[in-house]
Amino acid sequence: MSSPISTADLHDEALLARLRAMVAESPVPEAAISEILQALQKARGYIDDEALQLAATMTGLSPVKVEELCTFYSLLLREPVGIHVMRVCDSIACHMAGAQDILAQARQHCGVEFGEVSRSGKLTVIPHVCIGMCDRAPALMVDDEALGPMDKQALTRLLAQLEADVWKPS
Ligand code: FES
């Protein structure tokens, strides 16, 4: 769900028109909340307080309720992230196939803890539940792209591409 971080203006008329259309196409305004939050995260990189308030206003939900939804859905991010977000699956199939080694290598590369922005600013690595790629374990996602099976060499190449801004989803 996440995409390269941007500083999209929440007053941008094109963005607001898309959000209004989501509300208009929903049976009730609250039903659009998930789609709106995803769109805001795509535009901003994460759901900051301003985006959360906008989502609440547009759907008629309370900010507290929207905050709860952001907490519940692990794909929604409330903290700043790097240009790319890497979600490394640590559920059972990937765990058995070496996910902990992948996580350790990715964290060492970033030089920070999981969920934080890497020293280069290019990446945030987050352990994640099953991403539906169990047959290609260990698997991970970069932004919206699922990749696997991953090993030390493949991850080294991927990290180098991300650092050099030459990685592209297929
Ligand atoms: S357990 Fe890792 S993708 Fe399903």
Image: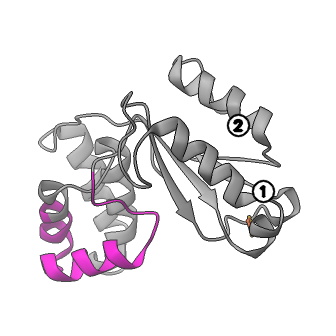
Amino acid, disc 1: Pro
In the displayed structure, would residue 125 be above or below residue 83?
A: below
Amino acid under label 2? Answer: Leu
Residue 66 in the magenta stretch? The answer is yes
State the residue lying farthest toward the right.
135
Instruction: List x then y, in percent, for residue 121.
Output: 36, 31
Badge 2 crowding class, 10 Å Cα cut-off, few under 14, some 14 to 19, many 20 or more, is some
Q: Which mark is residue 138?
A: 1
Q: At x 11% / y 42%, what residue is drawn?
A: 11
What residue is shown at x 61% (from left), y 23% (from top)?
160
Q: Is residue 70 left or right of residue 159?
A: left
In the rendered image, residue 123, in percent from the top left (x then y), is placed at: 45, 37
* Residue 15, quarter of the rendered image: top left
Q: Camera-side residue: 131 or 62?
A: 131
Q: Earlier in the sequence, mark 1 or mark 2?
A: 1
Circle 2 residue: 155
**Up/down of 53 relative to 169, above or below:** below
Where disc 1 sits, the SS reads: loop
Question: Image quadrant of residue 68?
Answer: bottom left
First to last magenta residue range: 53-79
- Tell me the quadrant of the picture where the C terminus can be found: top right
Q: Is residue 144 magenta?
A: no
Does residue 139 lie above or below 56 as drawn?
above
* SS at mark 2 in the image: helix
Q: Is residue 143 visible?
A: no
Horizontal side of residue 29 vs 134, given as left or right: left
Q: Ligand 1 sits in which quadrant?
A: bottom right
Residue under the image location 12 percent in, 68 percent down? 57
25 is higher (above) or lower (below) than 103:
below
